[in-house]
C-alpha cells in the first residue's frame, strides 16, 4: 500500500501542508504575551491569540490593569522560550498512521529508545541510578503515585495500610488515596505522628517528595522498618530547582516530564522500580486504569528528550537554572526590605551536574506573613492582587502561602511588581510611623 | 521572543527537518508487512522495520510458517490503510511549545474546537444526540468507565452499590471495579441475576455495552428503577460495525477514538453527560486520577476528526464499512461449510447513516465449537494456530471464543487461511466417514 518514493532533499510529498500550517500559526503575532495554536479557536479562518492572563486584545497587546498575578499554577511554562528557540530540533511530525496500535502489554510495551533515553538522562544528570531493573510509564506523577500505592499495599493485611507524608504536603495526596475508600489503604496524615506508634501490626506507605513541591526541602523518609514502604517523588529533583548532590537509589522513584521540560500538558512520567513484583503490580494497575500511556505523549517525550540531551544537557539546564536563579534573585531582593513577609531559606551546595556550588532555586516560594494581624496570608496577598495557594491546602498553617515561580515570564514580572508595591506600602507606613 | 517572519508559500523555516525525517522514515520499505516509526529502534542510523506478527526479516519480507494467527488483539488497525492514503490531511506538526500548560481545570479545560467537532460528528453519524449538556475527555473508554462508576455511586449509601453487566462481558469490568476494594461499590456479576431482588435498599450501576464488544449485540439495560444508574458504553456504535438505527440519548454515554479511527495507541475518549453533578464528579475523578488528558492526544484526535468529517464522513465510513463487510463475507463463506464451528447471527437493519439497509459487521466473531468433544474451543483453535480470546474471559462458556476481525489485513488473511485449513480437515474427515 505504501513504500518507496521517499522525500528528496528538497521535496516534501505529504508533510508540507501540515508544516506550512504549523509555521503559519506560529507566525501569528501575539505581542509576546500570548500564543496561537493549530487547534485553537478560529476567527477569520485564523486561530486566535490565546493571551497570557494579564493581557487581552486580538494580539494580546493590551495590559489588564485589574489583573491578579497568577502565582497558583504548577505548570513549569518558564521553559517555553527554550522550546521556541530550539524550534527546529523539537518539532515533530506525527503521521496519521503513527503507532495506531496500543503497545501496552506487548513485549514492546515501553519504547526501547525512550527507555534508553531516560537511562542516559539520569546518568548525565547524576540524579538517579539509571539501571533500577524496571521502568513503567504513566500519565505523569499523579497516576504513578496511585499505581505505587496500589502496588506496595500488602495483600490481605489485617488492617488498612496507612499512607502518610510529611507536612507540608499536597492535599491531593489525601484526596487521591481516599478516592475510592479502599478496604486496603487509607490516608493517615502527617508521617511524624506515627513514629512512636506501639501498634506493630500496622503497615505504612510513606510519600517522600524530595525536593518537596511546596517549600523545596529535600525531604527524607521519616518512618522506617520492615512494615514501611516508601514512594520517592523526585519530580522536582532536577538541576533547575536544586543542586544535585547524589544519585538517588531508592526502591520506587517517580519522575515527570512536566517538571523536567515544562510540558505539563503532555501528561508523561516514569517510575524507576527495583522489585519485579512491585513493577508487575504497577504495570497491571496502569493497564486497568488507562490501558497504558498515550503513544502521542511518548513520541513527544522522545523528541523533547533528544533536545534536552543534546550536548549532555548543558545548554538546556543552564537555561533552566539561570531563569530560576534570576527569579529567586529578584524575589529575594524584593522581599529583603520587608519585615512583613519572609521567605524559606535556600542552601548552597555542590551540584554534581553543574560541577560547582550552587544555591537551590526551588519552583515555589514558601512565603510567611510575619505580622500578628496577617493571620490569613493568602487573603492578605489576594487583597493585593496576588493569587497564590494557601498553606492550608498543604496541611500547613494560614500564615503560609505558596507562590509559583515557574509560570511564564509575564506572570512572574507582574508578581514581582505587585510584591514591590506591597512592600513599598509597608516601608511607607514604617516611615509614617 | 518569537513572532513575525512567517513561512512563505514555499519556504519552511523550522519544520523542514522534522518533515524530512518523517517522510524518510515513512519511505523505508517493509514489504507491506510492517512499518518503521520515527521513534523506532535504530540500525545503521535508520529505524528498523517493525514487522506484522507473521513476518520477519529486515524488510519484513519473510513469512513465518510457524506463526499463530493473532485474533486476540482489540486494536482496530484495520483502518491503517485509510490513514496512509490520507497522509497529507492527517499529518500534524507538533511544535516544541505546543500547549505546554495543562489546561485541566481551567475555563479552557476542553478544547472548544475538539468539543465542537465531536458534536458535529455525532450529528453527522446520527449515533447520539450531540448536545448532552456536558462532555468530559478521558484516556479512552477504560478510564471513563471508572470515572462514571465513581460519579454515579450514591454518597453514603448503607450498602455497597452493585456494579453489574450482561453476560458476555469483558472481565476487565470486574477487575477495574474491584481494583481498590472500594467501600462504596463492588462488582456483582451478571445483571439478570438481580432482576427480581427483594432487597429494595440496594443500589445498582449497570454497564451496557451497545454494541457489545464480544458478540456485537446491541444490548439494552436489564435493570431499571430509581435505584439503578446506567453507563452506556457506545464505543462500538459506529457505522463500520453496526447499522445506526437511532441516535442514542442516554444520561451517560461513553465513546472512544480508538474504535472510531483505529488509534488505540492515542488513548482518547469522551463521555456525553446530561447531569451537571455527574459531570462535576467525573471531572474531579479525572483530575485526581491523571490530571486530565494529554494535550498531544487531544491534538491528534482533533486532526484525525478533521479528516473523518471531510465530506460528512462518507468516504471514511465507506472504507471502514467495506473492509469490515469483506471480512464478514470471507469469514461467513469459510465457516458456512463447517458443522464444527458456528458464528453469531447478524441482522439486516436500515442504517440511517448509510441510508440503506445494511447487515451488521461486528468487530469480533463470536465462534462456538459445536462438537461435543470440543469442550474447550479456545484450546481447539490454539492447537490449530489460531489465537483468539477464550469465552471464559467474558464470563461465557468454554465453547465460545472471540476472534478479532479488526486487526491488520495480514493478520486477518492468516486467520482465514488457518480457518479454511481447519474446516477442510473437517470435511475431509466427513468424507472419510
Image (cartoon, coloured by chain):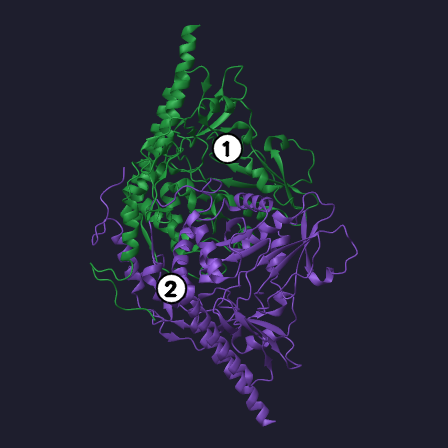
Chain colours: A green, B purple
Residue B42 visible, this orientation: no
Residue lying furthest right? B198
Q: CA distance from mark 1 to mark 2?
A: 49 Å
**Looking at the image, residue A383 lies above or below residue A59:** above
Residue lying furthest top? A433
Residue A44 visible, this orientation: yes
Q: Position of residue B225 (x, y in %)?
A: 71, 55
Q: Nearer the viewer, residue A125 or B431?
A: B431
Q: Is residue B140 left or right of residue A205?
A: left
Q: In which quadrant of the rendered view does residue A237 lie?
A: top left
Q: Is residue A127 left or right of residue B395?
A: left
Pointer 2 residue: B83
Q: Position of residue A226 (x, y in %)?
A: 61, 41
Q: Which mark is residue B65?
A: none
Pointer 1 residue: A219
Q: Is residue A233 left or right of residue B12?
A: right
Amino acid at each position: 500500500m505504501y513504500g518507496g518514493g521517499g522525500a528528496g532533499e528538497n521535496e516534501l510529498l505529504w508533510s508540507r501542508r501540515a508544516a506550512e500550517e504549523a509555521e503559519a500559526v506560529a507566525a501569528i503575532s501575539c505581542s509576546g504575551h500570548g500564543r496561537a495554536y493549530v487547534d485553537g479557536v478560529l476567527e477569520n479562518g485564523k486561530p486566535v491569540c490565546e493571551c497570557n492572563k494579564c493581557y487581552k486584545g486580538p494580539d494580546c497587546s493590551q495590559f489588564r490593569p485589574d489583573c491578579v498575578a497568577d502565582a497558583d499554577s504548577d505548570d513549569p511554562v518558564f521553559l517555553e522560550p527554550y522550546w521556541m528557540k530550539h524550534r527546529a530540533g523539537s518539532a515533530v511530525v506525527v503521521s496519521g498512521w503513527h503507532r495506531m496500535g496500543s503497545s501496552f502489554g506487548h513485549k514492546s510495551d515501553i519504547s526501547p529508545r525512550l527507555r534508553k533515553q531516560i537511562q542516559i538522562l539520569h546518568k548525565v544528570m547524576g540524579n538517579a541510578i539509571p539501571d533500577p531493573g524496571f521502568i513503567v510509564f504513566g500519565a505523569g506523577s499523579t497516576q504513578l503515585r496511585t499505581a505505587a500505592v496500589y502496588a506496595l499495599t500488602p495483600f490481605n493485611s489485617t488492617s488498612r495500610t496507612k499512607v502518610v507524608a510529611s507536612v507540608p504536603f499536597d492535599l491531593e495526596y489525601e484526596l487521591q488515596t481516599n478516592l475510592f475508600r479502599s478496604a486496603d489503604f487509607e490516608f493517615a496524615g502527617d508521617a511524624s505522628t506515627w513514629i512512636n506508634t506501639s501498634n506493630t501490626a500496622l503497615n505504612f506507605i510513606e510519600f517522600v517528595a524530595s525536593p518537596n513541591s511546596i517549600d523545596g526541602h529535600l525531604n527524607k523518609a521519616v518512618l522506617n522498618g520492615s512494615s514501611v514502604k516508601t514512594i520517592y517523588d523526585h519530580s522536582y529533583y532536577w538541576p533547575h530547582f536544586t543542586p544535585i548532590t547524589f544519585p538517588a537509589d531508592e526502591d520506587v522513584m517517580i519522575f515527570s516530564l512536566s517538571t523536567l521540560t515544562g510540558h505539563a500538558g503532555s501528561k508523561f512520567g516514569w517510575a524507576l522500580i527495583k522489585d519485579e513484583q512491585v513493577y508487575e503490580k504497577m504495570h497491571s494497575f496502569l493497564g486497568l486504569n488507562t490501558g497504558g500511556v498515550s503513544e502521542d505523549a511518548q513520541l513527544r517525550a522522545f523528541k523533547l528528550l533528544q533536545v534536552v540531551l543534546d550536548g549532555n544537557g548543558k545548554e538546556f539546564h543552564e537555561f533552566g537554572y539561570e531563569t530560576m536563579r534570576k527569579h529567586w534573585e529578584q524575589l529575594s531582593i524584593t522581599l529583603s526590605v520587608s519585615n512583613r513577609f519572609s521567605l524559606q531559606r535556600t542552601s548552597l551546595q555542590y551540584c554534581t551536574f553543574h560541577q560547582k556550588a550552587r544555591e537551590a532555586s526551588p519552583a515555589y516560594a514558601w512565603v510567611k506573613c510575619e505580622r500578628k494581624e496577617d493571620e490569613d496570608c493568602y487573603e492578605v496577598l489576594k487583597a493585593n492582587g496576588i493569587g497564590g495557594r494557601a498553606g492550608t491546602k498543604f496541611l500547613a498553617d494560614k500564615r503560609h502561602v505558596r507562590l509559583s515561580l515557574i509560570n511564564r515570564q509575564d506572570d512572574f514580572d507582574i508578581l514581582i511588581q505587585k510584591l514591590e508595591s506591597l512592600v513599598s506600602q509597608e516601608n511607607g507606613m514604617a516611615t509614617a510611623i
